[in-house]
Amino acid sequence: MKLYKILISLLVICFAACGSDDVPNPTPPGPEPPVGSDERTVLIYMAAENNLNQFSIEDLNEMKKGSKALNDNQNLIVYVDQKGSGKPYYARIKDGEYIDSVGLEETSSSDPAILEKALQYMRENYQAKSYGLVLWGHATGWLIKNDSIPYAKTRAYASDEDESPTTWMNIPSLARAIKNGMNGEKLSFIHGDCCNFGCIEVAYELRQVTDYVIGSPAEVPDAGSNFSDLSGLFDTSSTFYKLIIDNYWDYYLTQFKEKGTIYYNVNYGDLAGYSVPLIAVKTSELENLASATAQLLNSIQDKLKPTGQLNFNNVIYYAVNNGLNNNYDMYKTLKENTSEADFKTWEPAFEKALAYYRLSPRWMSIVSNLRKKMPSFDAISDNCRVLSMFFPGSQYKNVYPSWNTTIQQLQWNGPISWQQYGW
């Protein structure tokens, strides 16, 4: 999820002034360009039928500003589903305007079929040499319950509060929707502009539909990306993901310093000098990493069993759900619990998969216990690599459904096989 935290009335007044009058009038899509003629098309999928709705208005205005720097061979497409502001729509944003749009029937943005159609619309109407996808909204990483049906606290992506009860989209469903919507063609990147997206389980699930997975294993601030600067999303260099991450990281470094009465954890200004932990994962290296990780875990079998105990002392964790710590730093946890020789054998596979990261040992959080714990984390670059991983444990046995068994529905469990350790 994105954080939802409004602390001053001025912001409320500003958001109210924006309103929903900015929804574009339906117009037919522009003429289809020659196949592959454009450089890149990016779809921003905005699941905003929830308490982030007002931030979608702000971000759409940022996109208009950022679109002025795009050239004619760069297509910024949005799917927008807002709360209480009319029906969903597609639109292209160019030169600060909606240049074409298509109104849609009311539906749920958490329905994988809707994401699939949005990708199909993008691919068929704005063909390009490469494609990117930004997932805008709420998320909690890999956590899974029932597949694409209503449920409450355990979730993955795209909260739709207009459904009763609220509906979400699980990561396996997300992967299938992308594969179908892209007709098997890989995206250049998927950027999760949402909380807890930067975990190994999500990246592995998406390895066949994208070249890179970009996101944070932690919570991200309510406003998410600074879409006034779209340069990273449309950069076609071999290290474009660095620009996406650096733009995001540097933006909140500045925001946390300048707006300490809005962005803080315990006391005003206490996040000055910090930002948001972010990673880019190279998916072509993930199967090698999975194999290496399975081998490394086999070296500490006794610690992984229900009767065993992993050492998490001062290991940074990026999330708390159901009151339980999770999303532990993968690199740090394995380093603390395996032999030096075994760890060094595993490490090269990890480094190849982790294309880029920016560490922040503190970030904005709505979880009081996590906010208080952050100063004690052993969170330096030599010890952490930002990518998170779930490790089953007895503390999760009373979660319904149990994370210890639902983790086995993810493809990551194929090579890891948590059930062999008694889970």
Image (spheres, rainbow, N blue to C red):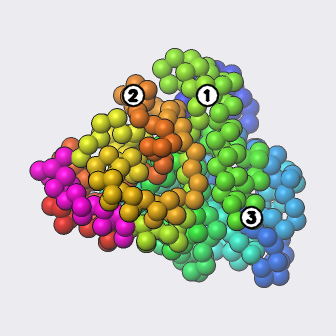
x and y, in percent, of residue 335 in the image: 35, 49
Type of the residue with mark 2: Ser
Q: Distance between the Cα atoms at labels 2 and 3?
A: 38 Å
The crowding category of the residue bearing disc 2, from other C-alpha atoms within 10 Å (few below 14, some 14 to 19, many at least 20), is few
Q: Distance between the Cα atoms at labels 2 and 1?
A: 17 Å
The crowding category of the residue bearing disc 1, from other C-alpha atoms within 10 Å (few below 14, some 14 to 19, many at least 20), is some
Q: Residue at x 16, y 56 (%)?
A: 302
Left or right of residue 35, residue 308 in this image:
left
Q: Distance between the Cα atoms at labels 1 and 3?
A: 29 Å
Q: Which residue is drawn at 74% across and 64% down?
A: 237
Q: Give the range drawn in magenta.
A: 291-309
Q: Looking at the rendering, which quadrant does residue 372 occupy? A: top left
Left or right of residue 322, residue 360 in this image:
right
**In the rendered structure, which disc, 1 or 3, sits on the residue that comes first in sequence?**
3
Q: Which residue is drawn at 30% across and 67% down?
A: 295
Under circle 3, the secondary element is loop
Type of the residue with mark 1: Gly
Asked if the stretch drawn in magenta spans residue 308, the answer is yes
The numbered dot on residue 376 is: 2
Asked if the stretch drawn in magenta spans residue 354, the answer is no
Report the residue marked by disc 3.
237
x and y, in percent, of residue 410 in the image: 35, 65
Under circle 2, the secondary element is helix
x and y, in percent, of residue 355 in the image: 57, 59
Q: Closest to the observer: 416 or 322?
A: 416
Type of the residue with mark 3: Ser
Report the residue marked by disc 1.
273
State whether the magenta stretch is mostly helix, strand or loop: helix
